[in-house]
Image (tube, rainbow, N blue to C red):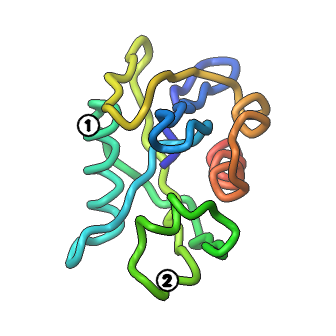
Amino acid sequence: MVVRRPAEVAAEYLVVLRSPEKLGYWHLVAGGVDWGEEPVAAAGRELLEETGLEAPVVPLGATLDYDLSGDPEPVRERFPAGTERIIVWPFVADAPQGWEPTLDDEHVESRWLDAEQAIALLFYPEPREAVRRAAV
């Protein structure tokens, strides 16, 4: 989920630092889809849970996916046995000017960056692609 703060010159993008227990990397707002839940509803729920922002979420094109086998064991353990690929539904939500996130316990820091800085800081390629899509 890309959280964007539109501006007259250039939008800012929210990046969040996962807690050490969550492997401590820079990421976007993210989370799983609960059984029976639609991806758009999951995106809105995760946005509210992780940042306190309640805002409309808009799809950012086609899904993204990645091979789970390249992730460390603590990440792979979060998924059911036999899961090989993860599907990512990219969404964007706009935050009002001046709004700041109230982070949950999965995150220890947040930053507002321009698209290029956010892309450079993000750990995984799928969030980087989501920011690229949101920046066009």
Q: Quadrant of residue 107?
A: top left
Q: Residue at x 72, y 48 (%)?
A: 132
Residue neighbourhood size for the residue with mark 2, other residues' Cα within 10 Å, grouped as few (<14), some (14–19), many (≥20): few
Asked if the residues shown at circle 2 and circle 1 are in contact, with their CB atoms under 8 angstroms apart, the answer is no
Q: Residue furthest top?
A: 98
The one nearer the camera, 10 or 86, is 86
Q: Residue at x 61, y 25 (%)?
A: 12
Q: Residue at x 30, y 60 (%)?
A: 42
In the image, residue 72 sits, relative to residue 70, either above or below, namely: above
Amino acid carrying label 1: it is Glu
Q: Which residue in the structure is indicated by mark 2? A: 83
Residue neighbourhood size for the residue with mark 1, other residues' Cα within 10 Å, grouped as few (<14), some (14–19), many (≥20): some
Q: Residue furthest left?
A: 36
Q: Residue at x 48, y 60 (%)?
A: 59
Q: Quadrant of residue 51?
A: top left
In the image, residue 80 sits, relative to residue 99, either above or below, namely: below
In the image, residue 104 sits, relative to residue 83, either above or below, namely: above
Tell me the mark number nearer the camera, choosing from 2 and 1: 2
Q: Secondary structure at mark 1?
A: loop
Q: CA distance from mark 2 to mark 1?
A: 31 Å
Q: Position of residue 97 (x, y in %)?
A: 44, 16
